[in-house]
Amino acid sequence: MTKISLISPVDGSVYAERAVIPLAAAKEAVAEARAAQKSWAALPLAERIATVMAGIDALEAKTPEIVPELAWQMGRPVRYGGEFGGVRERASYMAQIAPEALADEVIEETAKATRLLAREPQGVVFVIAPWNYPFLTAINTIVPALIAGNAVVLKHASQTLLAGERLADAFAQAGLPAGVFRNIVLDHAGTEALIRARAFDFVNFTGSVGGGRAIEAAAAGTFCGTGLELGGKDPGYVRADADLDAAVDGLMDGAMFNSGQCCCGIERIYVHETLFDAFVEKAVSWVRGQRLGNPLDPETTLGPMAHARFATVVRRQIAEAVAAGARPLIEPAEFPADDGGAYLAPQILIDVTHDMAVMREESFGPVVGIMPVRDDAEAIRLMNDCDYGLTASIWTRDAAQARAIGAQLETGTVMMNRCDYVDPALCWTGCKDTGRGAALSTLGYHALTRVKSYHLKKA
């Protein structure tokens, strides 16, 4: 029997181990979900909302246990208290807008005819969740999918195996009918086999570009809908009129929080040349104020990366950039917890160019390159010079100019004077190699339902 081992980044030990479900058993689980979905969808919307939100309550009640569990699984420091503020915000908002988002759109209601567009659940939704925010990213799809009347099958990342179990326990405790939500442990081969077999009506995946391509290949010819959020290389731009201190604090937090392991984290920064030196000086000071160490220590602000192999990628990008002329501003010795493995000292690079991987390829770690720019036009060109398009952050006092710049950016979300935030009222989407699809907002419900048209001629 194949097993998946969760190697803790805290100390390299095996923190959890689970058996991979055999393909035949996985197909049975999906069949049970499909059988349970019709009855679930037939319940009144208010009842579905109440049950789902009771599941969120049950999950939140487990916070004291889950926070250290997350530290052991993927390295986030306990001082940040888990993800449940965001989970509550997103779940509550999606519950609030559900009646309107799922309502019939009446085109005509006369003595002659009724014409309307109705929204029906897709059926069985498959959620493939990542490890970096194992509850937040999963909730983005799970909550609206269930509220809309779908059944959900969850396959969580191997690095956060226990997150899927926590979600299943919470929804069971809330009284979600058996089969409507299933957490299963799958390997890549089993995942692709189920998709190829047309087991699902919609697949939502958050992860790597390679993973997204594999899912698209598996889904080819099945006509199964897919939502793919495949990461980014998100830029920040500091205009000449920016509040410098606010820009440093916001962008550096966006670059370093969660050890840089954020889908919409800041990975490259462009600063107007008149502010460049001051920005860099303050950014270095900001980073030196961080503490790398054991995530179970309340004083730690930067934990290890989730796995040593992820840290290896970042170290390689830094080394290649330095060899090509980039200048590192942080000595690793300033962070003695850097062990050459999962514990990685944060780094700021200047004298970088777009010929370097660290400025073009996803790093997903605590490193950021900073470049001076002459004007908006140069900043726009450099921000767009990337294969990804998830978010972009503009720091300025001029909202009209931020909007004008945003209109020229190839990205899913434009933010002004903030970064690394997902607003549930706005559509979470991307372009280019970031993938395609829509999560959260009313459009998130549209992705998880299908349209049925009614033309009822009365006379």
Image (spheres, rainbow, N blue to C red):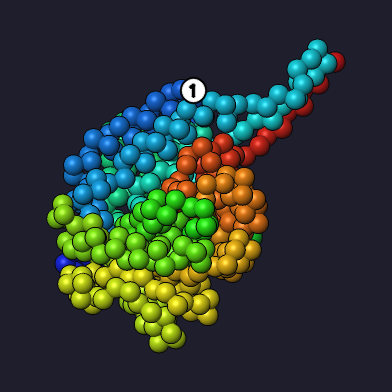
Q: Is residue 222 visible?
A: no
Q: Is residue 138 above or below residue 348?
A: above
Residue at (38%, 46%) from the top-left corner?
Answer: 136
Q: Quadrant of residue 311?
A: bottom left
Q: Is residue 54 above or below residue 238?
A: above
Q: State the residue lying farthest toward the front.
A: 274
Residue for badge 1: 44
Left or right: residue 431 versus residue 95 is: right
Residue 290 coordinates in the image, percent (x, y): 24, 60
Left or right: residue 52 versus residue 100 is: left
Residue at (42%, 67%) from the top-left corner?
Answer: 277
Residue 257 coordinates in the image, percent (x, y): 33, 56
Left or right: residue 249 versus residue 58 is: right
Residue at (16%, 54%) from the top-left corner?
Answer: 299
Q: Is residue 296 above or below residue 269?
A: above
Q: Amino acid at mark 1?
A: Pro
Residue 7 coordinates in the image, percent (x, y): 23, 66
From the image, which quarter does the N terminus lie in?
A: bottom left
